[in-house]
Image: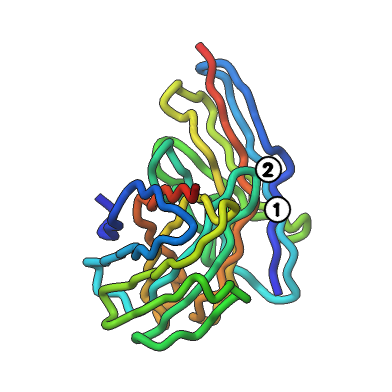
Amino acid sequence: ETGVTQTPRHLVMGMTNKKSLKCEQHLGHNAMYWYKQSAKKPLELMFVYNFKEQTENNSVPSRFSPECPNSSHLFLHLHTLQPEDSALYLCASSATGTGNNEQFFGPGTRLTVL
Amino acid sequence: AQSVTQLDSQVPVFEEAPVELRCNYSSSVSVYLFWYVQYPNQGLQLLLKYLSGSTLVKGINGFEAEFNKSQTSFHLRKPSVHISDTAEYFCAVSPPNGNNDMRFGAGTRLTVKP
């Protein structure tokens, strides 16, 4: 148990659907992250939130919309996705300002866009 | 900015043999270094990390890594692997400034054969 949970674990959606991915951390961390993991490619950092404020958006298309209502919860809202968006989406959290920088990951959501 | 290069995308090895997974980084400042492991259908789990001090770092599951500043490397080693070590291994680097900037390598797929 990593302390970071993600739901759903698997998601299949059409290009016209709207869905949301959820992440919750039980570690008391103040920073949360969304990563995209595609086959044969390095992890791509998508969004970073510090104390509920978005501090990084790595040129992610607007069809991905993050939401961080509090330091423990992070959502990724999806709409009008493309087949190339199929990937494993990983959530992570960390305690910034501790001098450690270690990130704790959830199990991921395997997304398939048809 | 930092970057990480994992020199081998796949490493096949027989059970009980030693293994080394190579990682080189590029940075103009001092760094923190990490190795993560990802088992099938799971998120990333921290194996070990170098923050400061002794350059030889011991982690979980019998793995260790050595920080070599002159060669900008942080290779991962295990003297005798098990079938259960079959997984994807990621090297990562971050600056020691407490922010969220962690960069991952493309990963090395370790396959342990009986």
Q: What x and y, as percent, mark residue B32?
A: 57, 66
Dot 2 lies on which element? loop
Vertical side of B57 occupied by A95: above or below = below
Front residue of this view, candidates B41 and A61: A61
Amino acid type at image mark 2 = Arg
* 10 Å crowding of disc 2: few (<14), some (14-19), many (20+): some
Q: What x and y, as percent, mark residue B58?
A: 47, 46
Badge 1: chain ID:
B
Front residue of this view, candidates B42 and B83: B42
Residue on which disc 2 sits: B22
Residue on which disc 1 sits: B73
What mark, if any, has residue A113 been given in the picture?
none
Front residue of this view, candidates A75 and A92: A75
Q: Mark 2 and 1 residues: CB-CB less than 8 Å, in contact?
A: yes
User: In the image, B16: left or right of A95?
Assistant: right
Q: Residue at x 49, y 71 (%)?
A: A64
Q: Residue at x 41, y 52 (%)?
A: A13
* 10 Å crowding of disc 1: few (<14), some (14-19), many (20+): many
Q: Residue furthest front?
A: A16
- Mark 2–mark 1 distance (CA, rounded to whole Å): 8 Å
Q: Residue at x 36, y 79 (%)?
A: A67
The image quadrant that residue B31 belongs to is: bottom right
Amino acid type at image mark 1 = Ser
Q: Earlier in the sequence, mark 2 or mark 1?
A: 2
Q: Do pointers 2 and 1 mark residues of a single chain?
A: yes
